[in-house]
Image (tube, helix red, strand yellow):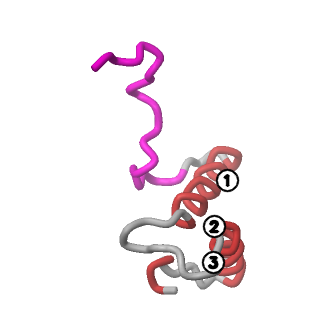
Amino acid sequence: MTVDPSIDFSSHDPHDREELSEDPRIREAQLLERRMRDALATKEHPMHDGERTADRLRRARTDDDTGDAESPAAH
């Protein structure tokens, strides 16, 4: 197996739950990345019949706006 020389091993790990940045632009991107990652179907949180990723993203945004940001697994 070959190794891709363009891989940046110091780049952000999407599973890393690090503290949010102080920079508002970076923090906004971190929050968007978190919402998008949480909306994806996983083995532990599969899609329901007729559900779309866009629906999950919309629901996550609504939860954030109302301050009811609960875990997506709780839906």
Specify few, some or many for label 2: CA neighbours under 10 Å numbering under 14, 14-19, or 20 or more: some
Q: Which residue is mark 2?
A: 53
Q: Is residue 46 left or right of residue 44?
A: right
Whether 7 is drawn above or below 18: the answer is above
User: Residue at (41%, 55%) from the top-left corner?
Assistant: 17
Q: Position of residue 58 (x, y in %)?
A: 71, 73
**What is the C-alpha distance between the residues marked 3 and 2?**
7 Å
Specify few, some or many for label 1: CA neighbours under 10 Å numbering under 14, 14-19, or 20 or more: few
Q: Which residue is mark 3?
A: 51
User: Residue at (56%, 48%) from the top-left corner?
Assistant: 21
Whether 74 is drawn above or below 52: the answer is below
Q: Position of residue 52 (x, y in %)?
A: 65, 71
Q: What is the magenta range?
A: 1-20
The reply to whether callout 3 and callout 2 are in contact (CB within 8 Å) is no
Mark earlier in primary sequence (3, 1): 1
**What is the C-alpha distance between the residues marked 3 and 1?**
26 Å
Q: Amino acid at mark 2?
A: Thr
The reply to whether callout 3 and callout 1 are in contact (CB within 8 Å) is no
Q: Position of residue 54 (x, y in %)?
A: 70, 67
| Marker disc for residue 52 | none
Magenta-drawn stretch, dominant element (helix, strand or loop): loop
Q: Is residue 36 left or right of residue 10?
A: right
User: Residue at (63%, 73%) from the top-left corner?
Assistant: 56
Q: Position of residue 47 (x, y in %)?
A: 52, 74
Q: Amino acid at mark 3?
A: Glu
**What is the C-alpha distance between the residues marked 2 and 1?**
20 Å
Identify the image quadrant of residue 39: bottom right
Of badges 3 and 1, the one in the foreground is 3
Q: Amino acid at mark 1?
A: Glu
Q: Which residue is mark 1?
A: 28
Residue 10 lies in the magenta stretch:
yes
